[in-house]
Image (cartoon, rainbow, N blue to C red):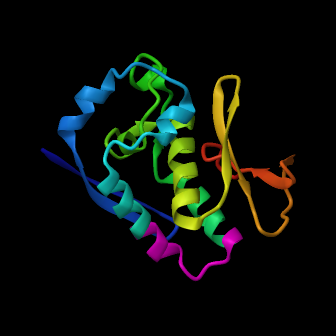
């Protein structure tokens, strides 16, 4: 059983279908570290399609412009709700679930964003866990103004896919 998804913001559009039959199975998947959700691939063909769509739409932009456009898309194309409000319990999503459920929270956006940063743009990044919040950072070719830290000789800039305007 297939469910359509259509997401659009800031000149980026993603569309396709997800297999609804998978989601009841993974809905109550035993919880694990956020990084494990980010590394797990439930529907590889769907991920490849998303990557292809985004590569086409972000081609020709500088690295900073493409990262910024992807960040703004992730911040705004998905409706926000805490897991407690939406599911009644903490429910980190596998990347594919953000396309199925009508609402998501910080770790879900961070998983989507960091996956696309690497697989679409080749931009190294980190998931960042704060108490009660999940975010991301990016390693850019050119320095920018913003909060950053050094890691193994490279500068990573905080790039929060939930906090609009970050």
On the image, the x and y values in percent for residue 65 come to 66, 71
Farthest residue in the left direction?
Answer: 1
Quarter location, residue 64 = bottom right
Q: Is residue 99 left or right of residue 125?
A: left
Please tell me which residue is depicted at 63% across the width and 34% down the height of the picture.
134
Please tell me which residue is depicted at 56% across the width and 35% down the height of the picture.
35
Q: Is residue 24 left or right of residue 164?
A: left
Task: Return the residue nearer the eye: 39 or 60.
Answer: 39
Please tell me which residue is depicted at 23% across the width and 36% down the height of the picture.
22
Question: Which stretch appears magenta?
Answer: 53-64
Q: Is residue 118 left or right of residue 16?
A: right
Task: Return the residue nearer the eye: 31 or 107.
Answer: 31
Is 60 magenta? The answer is yes
Q: Magenta stretch: dominant SS?
A: helix
Query: Would residue 76 be seen by someone viewing this image from the given angle?
Result: yes
Q: Is residue 116 left or right of residue 41?
A: right
Please tell me which residue is depicted at 37% across the width and 61% down the height of the picture.
48
Is 131 magenta? The answer is no
On the image, the x and y values in percent for residue 144 come to 84, 64
On the image, the x and y values in percent for residue 80 come to 49, 38
**The N terminus appears in which quarter of the rendering?**
top left
């Amino acid at each position: 059983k297939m469910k359509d998804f259509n997401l659009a913001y800031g000149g980026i559009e993603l569309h396709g279908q997800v297999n609804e039959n998978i989601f009841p199975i993974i809905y109550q998947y035993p919880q694990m570290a956020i990084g494990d959700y980010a590394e797990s691939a439930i529907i590889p063909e769907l991920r490849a399609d998303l990557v292809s769509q985004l590569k086409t739409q972000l081609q020709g932009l500088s690295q900073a412009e493409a990262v910024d456009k992807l960040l703004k898309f992730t911040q705004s194309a998905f409706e926000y709700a805490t897991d407690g409000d939406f599911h009644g319990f903490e429910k980190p999503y596998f990347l594919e679930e953000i396309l199925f459920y009508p609402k998501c929270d910080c770790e879900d956006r961070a998983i989507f964003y960091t996956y696309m940063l690497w697989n679409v743009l080749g931009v190294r990044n980190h998931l960042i866990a704060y108490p009660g919040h999940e975010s991301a950072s990016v390693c850019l070719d050119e320095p920018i103004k913003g909060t950053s830290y050094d890691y193994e000789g490279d500068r990573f800039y905080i790039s929060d896919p939930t906090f609009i305007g970050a």
